[in-house]
């Protein structure tokens, strides 16, 4: 937390605005739009809720196909299933680890020939880095397919000077507890279409019709963000740049210490924009390094350091095992060799050095001589 969140929360209590309406919610939506360069926003309970509403807004329904990045968390695809639609997964490129534009074009071309174009494409921006949006948006526009951006992990990143999440018909963001800024739980839907965000708010407030009594003509959801959490979000927005700088510094320290170690390669930063380095991720070649990813992860765990494999591709998940996938080799390889290192914004130099030394110790245990000091 920064220095402003408590003030806004106290204000919510003092004015008795606790429920999922209130001045902080309205202000959070306005200030978020200013931060990312959007015109309209609706604050909701989670990024998943925002994505569910986004898919419903563009007309996704039972039996429709929706293309989705495969290398991502399951929440990127679960809302497709909420609506009775079918996910079709697209593999990653090696440049950004995000959706491969060439594979997307090939998939759209194949589906067009079959007369079975998807209802939408969910483009995920992974680990704080934007996908290559222009060719993907061009392909979607060519085939008349709506692009929705899942920027849950990419708040603060840029693509050619703009915020990912603001290029498609709808963009969604997350403020879950592990994100670069947090409201403990929360999300945001943004769009240039004011009618879409208004409809999202309506559905998110149980689709309550304008009447003196409780009347509902459509199915709704309890998805609106509370005024208290919106106050936290307002304070967090004030320190977003500081959080991005802290995450990027983490990555820089890791790269300085480990970047030249044989067998270790860090997630590349694509030339088209700034990555927040929400998580610092690397891959390990066991032949060159002397140990595989899992041996490193377990060694870190023994040292009371939490690290995790990169996302297991959705086309490998049991729940989606029967879903169609275009490609898969890149994301499968990244999953096999990829590791996410501790990346919190409040990590100290001593903590970062402890992680680094623990990794180097694995290599040393494999019989490879390593340097003794890594952070000056």
Image (spheres, rainbow, N blue to C red):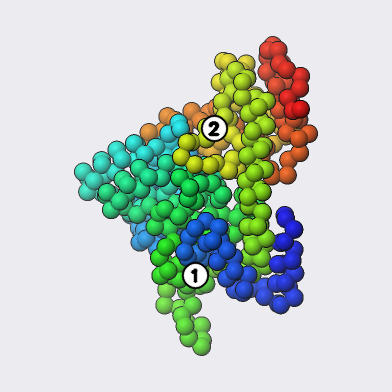
- At horizontal 51% and vertical 72% (from top left) the residue drawn is 206
- At horizontal 75% and vertical 69% (from top left) the residue drawn is 10
Query: Against 163, is 351 above or below?
Result: above
Residue 146, quarter of picture: bottom left
316 displayed left or right of 241: left
Q: CA distance from mark 1 to mark 2?
A: 37 Å
112 displayed left or right of 243: left
Q: State the count of labels.
A: 2
Secondary structure of residue under mark 1: helix
Residue 267 is marked as: 2
- At horizontal 63% and vertical 29% (from top left) the residue drawn is 255
Q: Earlier in the sequence, mark 1 or mark 2?
A: 1
Q: Mark 1 — residue? A: 201
Secondary structure of residue under mark 2: loop
Q: Quadrant of the N terminus?
A: bottom right
- At horizontal 55% and vertical 50% (from top left) the residue drawn is 155
Viewer can see residue 74: no
Residue 248, quarter of picture: top right
Q: Position of residue 196 (x, y in %)?
A: 41, 67
Query: Against 211, is 284 above or below?
Result: above
Q: Position of residue 179 (x, y in %)?
A: 61, 49
Q: Position of residue 346 (x, y in %)?
A: 73, 44
Q: Quadrant of the C terminus?
A: top right
Query: Against 88, is 13 above or below?
Result: below
Viewer can see residue 170: yes
| Mark 1 surroundings: few (<14), some (14-19) or many (≥20) residues within 10 A | many
Residue 330, quarter of picture: top left
Judged from this view, the residue extending furthest toward the bottom is 212
Which of pointers 1 and 2 indicates the residue nearer the eye? 2
């Amino acid at each position: 937390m920064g220095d402003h969140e408590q003030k806004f929360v106290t204000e919510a209590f003092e004015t008795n605005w606790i429920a999922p309406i209130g001045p902080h919610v309205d202000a959070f939506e306005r200030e978020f739009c200013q931060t990312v360069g959007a015109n309209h926003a609706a604050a909701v309970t989670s990024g998943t809720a925002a994505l569910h509403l986004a898919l419903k807004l563009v007309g996704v329904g039972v039996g429709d196909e929706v293309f989705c990045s495969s290398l991502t968390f399951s929440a990127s695809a679960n809302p497709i299933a909420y609506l009775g639609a079918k996910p079709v997964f697209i593999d990653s490129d090696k440049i950004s680890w995000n959706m491969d534009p060439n594979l997307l074009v090939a998939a759209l071309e194949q589906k067009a020939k079959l007369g079975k174009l998807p209802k939408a494409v969910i483009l995920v921006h992974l680990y704080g880095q934007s996908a290559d949006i222009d060719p993907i948006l061009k392909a979607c526009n060519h085939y008349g397919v709506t692009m929705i951006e899942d920027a849950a992990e990419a708040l603060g990143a840029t693509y050619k000077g703009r915020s990912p999440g603001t290029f498609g018909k709808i963009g969604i963001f997350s403020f879950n507890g592990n994100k670069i800024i947090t409201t403990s739980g929360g999300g945001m839907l943004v769009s240039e279409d004011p009618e879409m965000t208004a409809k999202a708010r309506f559905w998110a407030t149980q689709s309550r019709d304008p009447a003196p009594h409780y009347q509902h003509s459509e199915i709704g959801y309890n998805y609106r963000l509370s005024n208290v959490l919106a106050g936290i979000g307002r304070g967090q927005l004030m320190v977003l740049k500081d959080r991005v700088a802290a995450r990027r510094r983490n990555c820089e320290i890791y790269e300085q210490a480990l970047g030249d170690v044989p067998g270790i390669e860090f997630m590349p930063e694509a030339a088209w924009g700034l990555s927040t380095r929400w998580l610092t991720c690397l891959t390990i070649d066991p032949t060159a390094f002397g140990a595989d990813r899992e041996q490193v992860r377990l060694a870190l765990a023994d040292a009371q350091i939490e690290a995790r494999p990169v996302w297991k591709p959705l086309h490998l998940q049991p729940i989606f095992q029967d879903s169609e996938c275009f490609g898969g080799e890149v994301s499968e390889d990244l999953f096999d060799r990829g590791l996410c290192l501790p990346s919190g914004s409040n990590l100290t130099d001593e903590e970062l050095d402890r992680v680094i030394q623990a990794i180097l110790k694995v290599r040393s245990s494999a019989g490879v001589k390593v340097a003794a000091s890594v952070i000056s």
